[in-house]
Amino acid sequence: MKRIEDYVRTIPDFPEKGIMFRDITTVIQSAEGFHLAIDTMQDLVKDLDYDIIAGAESRGFIFGAAMAYNLNKPMVLIRKKGKLPGETVAVDYTLEYGDVTTLEMHKDAVKPGEKVLLVDDLLATGGTINAMAQLVEKQGGEVAGMLVLLELAGLKGREFLEKYKVFSAVTYEGK
């Protein structure tokens, strides 16, 4: 039986020298790989209590939406600045390679007390998923957990997120 890792393509020296880029497009291009990824991710959080799934643009949408459909849960979109049509809340954060960017969520997407599972494709330094958590908490929501397909343990994102429950389907030891 194949593992998720068997569907992940590794591209050396992208986007810069010394980086081993873990490409998840090959996971979702395979019906079997995508099915395995979603089943594995859902299984990791099967005992977690949450009301809503929130996914980050754009790859978090892929995994989050599939899970929301399967589990009959609402799906909240967290997007880059200026992409949502309604009133939003925003958080600035730093990306893995040093650039600062902004994430937004509709102001009415999470109500006080609602428990939210945050879903993304990758945990590297933890900046993106931490910004997602800040958006949920700004609205009075509770982060029930953080779920990613891949984790790059060498970048210590899990340590940065120590106050949250973090789940990853696949962990790579390096960067």
Image: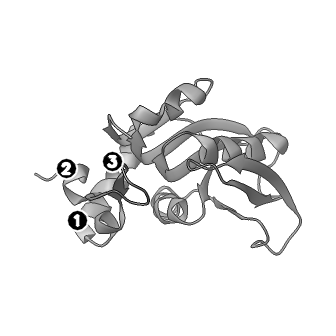
Q: Which residue is mark 3?
A: 40
- The picture places residue 73, in percent across and down from the top left corner, at 58, 56
- The picture places residue 80, in percent across and down from the top left corner, at 70, 65
What's the mark number on residue 3? 2
Q: Which residue is mark 1?
A: 32
Q: Secondary structure at mark 2?
A: loop
- The picture places residue 116, in percent across and down from the top left corner, at 65, 44
- The picture places residue 47, in percent across and down from the top left corner, at 46, 34
Given residues 115 and 84, the one toward you in this image is 84
Contact between marks 3 and 1 (CB within 8 A): the answer is no
Describe residue 27's horizontal placement relative to residue 106 as left or right. left
Q: Residues within 10 Å of mark 3 (few under 14, many from 20)?
A: some
Q: Quadrant of residue 151?
A: top left
Residue at image position (76%, 59%) is: 105
User: Earlier along the polypeptide chain: callout 3 or callout 1?
Assistant: 1
Given residues 100 and 67, the one toward you in this image is 100
Q: Secondary structure at mark 3?
A: helix
Contact between marks 3 and 2 (CB within 8 A): the answer is no
| Amino acid marked by disc 1 | Glu
